[in-house]
């Protein structure tokens, strides 16, 4: 039985590790108003470089730390130079998406190089513990605290007493004014990315040693925790990020003490949502500071959508509809069924992110809600499957909108963070609410799809069913876009202040968009549940949310036909070329990067 | 144009500027002679601040040229232009609010590497702007508008520029500070620094300027020596946005 002091020490140590990630995020956000979603990948890279150094090269500890810091910094510089600098004059969302793409690529490269299996990362420190009051502390704890304090001190000296440090601070406060003083903003960005990456890499090394284990799943977790800590401390606020991290460490540690390990992340994300709702500028930023987000107007690449004549669409739909009449393989139908299911999710996301401008990174949660609702309705209440799926859609619409509604007043990047957190919370609630969701065991034996008493078992009938549902949803959404409501959505996206002045109630319209989007996604999840017959809390994960986002950007944000085209392309092409699963994510990441760089309006243009 | 004989220090020639589809400048030509104060007058949204941004390289024109001391500035980044000797007092001052007054002033010397001379110049600023002496370690954001304007001017001077561009330096100041700022601009100019300033308040600006230009929806509609413009009735028209003055 550990004492409260132990939990406090543990919380502070873990908080220290988070701080190394969060400070980097804060520095980057400060100078470029960007949330760097690749920060966790650098942390992952740091951990694996550390593993190579320790296990294969047998470097002594101080040298290991230096090697990791330098190597990670180089990765950071490369990201800045080749991933982000070319996007300087792009729309605001471009760099954010690029960091997501970069993180996919880096994580996947690490996984392909080292395999996804966990590895041990010994700390090289003696395994002893000293008694301190009612708790104990070991050499590794002291090392982490020491690295944390040293980094903080170095950073303070850098920012306060060096010319480049002044330039960083000036740029963070007013980029244009700093340029007018002769500050070369590119050098500032470089410095900041280098420092952030070095700190992030060392953090990964220390965490690996702390748990004596590293694996590729660390990356997303680190990004999420860093973002939580940074936002809690106030985006762009460096000392705030440190305090936010320690607070996060403590909240998690006490949460674990009270309820158990599986609640750790739940506490982290609840803390984030509470802060976002109550104090979106963070705990330590006073109201005088301007909100660090731009208006939504420039958030999405403006373009003229490609016009597709109605007859061409009819021909395409008819072609897909009669496809099963030809001798095509089961495999092709299966692939297209997946594309139609993804298409429904993409319709939902393109409405919310494209038409409404709320770039959601947690859309898979809507699938999960729909899937669990439909599965449980049909299993425990014996509701006919057709109705259960609709129930899933309705539940997803209601619950999804309810969960996101406290964040309606957020803008830009903050919406993405909030949706990401809510998505994680949904997954964690599913994991922990065992009496209803059966927790980690998941739900098995979900009855197959059926319609008016007829089971849809063969691939052909499932194919037609899912295609029909998707087409109906697409038609509805097409109607919606040309209606008055659709125009109001776009007005709010383009300039919410003007829209409000015009008398549009933002919350009502955002709710309507999420209700419609939630329904489409919930239906997709519901169908998927009956198709898979088994689901658990990981069936619908963040990776799927990001895949949906890539699809939507590929098709053109807000573009209904684009969303479906994107789904077919991203699900179908890897199948056609028989690309192994572990390379697919890599390809998605590269596709996202290329799109953002060369065709931010997507294939068919934004609407 | 004014001073056609000697090569001007700064010249914009036939500049056309766009924000997306919207054209902001139409064949804009302006020149600033060495040692002169030149004022750009114009009503709201006439494109004055954009002219500043063109000079500083923050916005690039679609066509036309901007030269400083005979060399084009178009291919240069803002920091490079600043290193050529142009300092700025931006619209609404744009101090680094969370840095101290001392740090703000020293940021003005960012392009310089002669530490001792910079320290001397800081002392010189405190004689020029005596009020700032007691405020050096205060957060810049906590100063009054007039004090902030002093800091912004001191900051601009710290780079030892050959020219200062100012965007509405008297905006939002009390009458006392307005006089003080105008007097300082004259002092700075007498020390050899050329000044290009954007103003809405014509009568004030014409008191200290050598030449002036009047901008109306992106076109120069009137220009000439300040002395003659002061009595020109069309100046008023330009502001009211009434008859096509030129
Ligand atoms: N970044 C921008 N993007 C698009 N349009 C802009 C931008 N900046 C300015 N504009 C537009 O260009 C025009 C000229 O703006 P500018 O700021 O140069 O005017 P100004 O004369 O300085 O006005 P004021 O007296 O209000 O300071 C205005 O119509 C303005 O709305
Ligand atoms: Mg202006």
Image: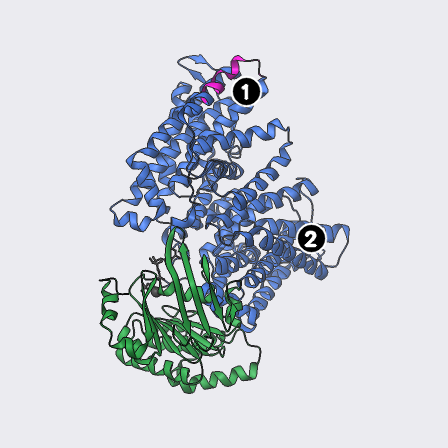
Figure quadrant of the C terminus of chain A: top left
Mark 1 neighbour density, 10 Å: few (under 14) some (14–19) many (20 or more): some
Q: Colour of chain B?
A: green
N-terminal-most mark, 2 or 1:
2
Q: Quarter of the image holding residue A393?
A: top left
Q: Position of residue A358 (x, y in %)?
A: 40, 43
For disc 2, the chain is A
Figure colour of chain A = blue
Does B174 appear in magenta? no
- Could you say which disc has been placed on residue A480 in the image? none
Question: Would you place residue A87 above or below residue A352 in this image?
Answer: below
Disc 2 + disc 1, Cβ < 8 Å: no
The overriding secondary structure of the stretch rendered in magenta is helix
Q: Residues within 10 Å of mark 2 (few under 14, many from 20)?
A: many
- Residue range highlighted in magenta: A317-328
Residue receiving disc 1: A333
């Amino acid at each position: 039985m550990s004492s409260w002091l132990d939990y406090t020490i543990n919380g502070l140590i873990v908080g220290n590790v988070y701080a190394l990630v969060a400070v980097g995020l804060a520095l980057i956000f400060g100078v470029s108003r960007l949330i760097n979603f690749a920060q966790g990948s650098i942390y992952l890279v740091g951990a694996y470089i550390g593993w190579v150094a320790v296990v294969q090269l047998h470097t002594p500890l101080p040298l290991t730390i230096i090697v990791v810091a330098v190597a990670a910094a180089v990765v950071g510089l490369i990201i800045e130079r080749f991933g982000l600098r070319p996007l300087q004059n792009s729309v605001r969302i471009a760099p954010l998406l690029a960091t997501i793409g970069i993180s996919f690529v880096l994580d996947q490269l690490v996984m392909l190089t080292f395999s996804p299996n966990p590895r041990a990362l010994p700390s090289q420190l003696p395994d002893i513990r000293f008694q301190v009051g009612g708790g104990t502390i070991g050499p590794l704890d002291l090392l982490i605290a020491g690295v944390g304090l040293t980094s903080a001190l170095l950073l303070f000296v850098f920012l306060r007493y060096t010319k480049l440090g002044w330039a960083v601070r000036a740029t963070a406060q007013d980029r244009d004014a700093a340029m007018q003083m002769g500050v070369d903003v590119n050098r500032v960005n470089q410095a900041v990315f280098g420092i952030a990456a070095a700190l992030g890499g060392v953090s990964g090394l220390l965490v690996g040693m702390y748990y004596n284990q590293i694996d590729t799943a660390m990356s997303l977790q680190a990004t999420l925790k860093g973002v939580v800590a940074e936002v809690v401390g106030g985006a762009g606020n460096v000392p705030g990020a440190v305090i936010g991290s320690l607070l996060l460490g403590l909240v998690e540690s006490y949460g674990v003490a009270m309820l158990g390990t599986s609640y750790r992340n739940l506490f982290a994300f609840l803390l984030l949502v509470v802060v976002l709702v109550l104090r979106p500028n963070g705990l330590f930023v006073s109201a005088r500071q301007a909100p660090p987000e731009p208006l939504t107007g420039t958030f999405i690449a403006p373009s003229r959508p490609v016009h597709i004549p109605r007859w061409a669409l009819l021909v395409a739909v008819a072609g897909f509809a009669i496809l099963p009449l030809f001798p095509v393989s089961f495999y092709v139908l299966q692939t297209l069924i997946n594309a139609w299911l993804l298409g429904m999710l993409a319709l939902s996301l393109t409405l919310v992110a494209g038409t409404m401008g709320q770039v959601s990174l947690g859309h898979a949660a809507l699938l999960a809600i729909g899937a669990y609702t439909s599965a449980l309705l049909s299993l425990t209440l014996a509701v006919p499957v057709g109705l259960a799926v609709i129930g899933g859609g309705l539940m997803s619409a209601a619950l999804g909108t309810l969960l996101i509604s406290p964040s309606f007043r957020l803008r830009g990047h903050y919406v993405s963070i909030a949706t990401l957190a809510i998505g994680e919370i949904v997954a964690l609630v599913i994991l922990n609410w065992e009496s209803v969701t059966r927790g980690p065991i998941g739900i098995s034996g979900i009855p197959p799809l059926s319609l008016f008493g007829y089971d849809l078992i063969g691939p052909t009938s499932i194919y037609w069913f899912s295609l029909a549902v998707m087409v109906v949803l697409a038609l509805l959404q097409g109607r919606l876009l040309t209606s008055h409501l659709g125009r109001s959505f776009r007005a709010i996206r383009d300039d919410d202040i003007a829209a409000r002045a015009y008398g549009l109630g933002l919350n009502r319209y955002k709710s309507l968009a999420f209700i419609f989007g939630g329904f489409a996604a919930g239906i997709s999840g519901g169908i998927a549940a009956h198709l898979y017959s088994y689901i658990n809390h990981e069936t619908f994960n963040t990776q799927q949310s990001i895949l949906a986002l890539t699809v939507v950007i590929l098709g053109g944000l807000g573009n209904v036909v684009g969303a479906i085209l994107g789904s077919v392309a991203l699900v179908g092409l890897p199948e056609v070329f028989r690309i192994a699963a572990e390379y697919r994510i890599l390809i998605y990441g590269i596709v996202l990067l290329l799109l953002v760089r060369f065709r931010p309006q997507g294939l068919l243009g934004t609407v | 144009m004014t001073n056609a004989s000697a090569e001007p220090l700064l010249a914009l020639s036939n500049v056309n500027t766009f924000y997306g589809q919207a054209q902001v400048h139409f064949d804009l030509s302006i020149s600033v002679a060495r040692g002169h104060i030149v004022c750009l007058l114009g009503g709201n949204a006439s494109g004055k601040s954009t002219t500043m941004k063109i000079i500083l390289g923050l916005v690039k024109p679609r066509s036309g040229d901007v030269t400083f001391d005979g060399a084009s500035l178009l291919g240069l980044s803002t920091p490079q232009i600043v290193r050529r000797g142009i300092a700025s007092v931006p619209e609404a001052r744009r101090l680094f609010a969370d840095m101290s007054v001392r740090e703000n002033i020293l940021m003005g010397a960012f392009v310089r590497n002669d530490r001792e001379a910079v320290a001397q110049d800081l002392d010189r600023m405190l004689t020029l702007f005596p009020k700032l002496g007691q405020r050096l370690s205060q957060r810049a954001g906590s100063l009054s508008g007039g004090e902030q304007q002093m800091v912004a001017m001191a900051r601009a001077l710290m780079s030892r520029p050959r020219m200062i561009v100012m965007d509405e330096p008297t905006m939002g100041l009390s009458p006392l500070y307005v006089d003080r700022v105008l007097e300082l601009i004259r002092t700075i100019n007498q020390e050899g620094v050329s000044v290009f300033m954007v103003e809405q308040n014509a009568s004030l600006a014409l008191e200290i300027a050598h030449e002036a230009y009047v901008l109306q929806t992106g076109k120069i509609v009137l220009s000439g020596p300040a002395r003659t413009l002061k009595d020109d009735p069309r100046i008023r028209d330009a502001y009211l946005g009434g008859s096509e003055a030129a």
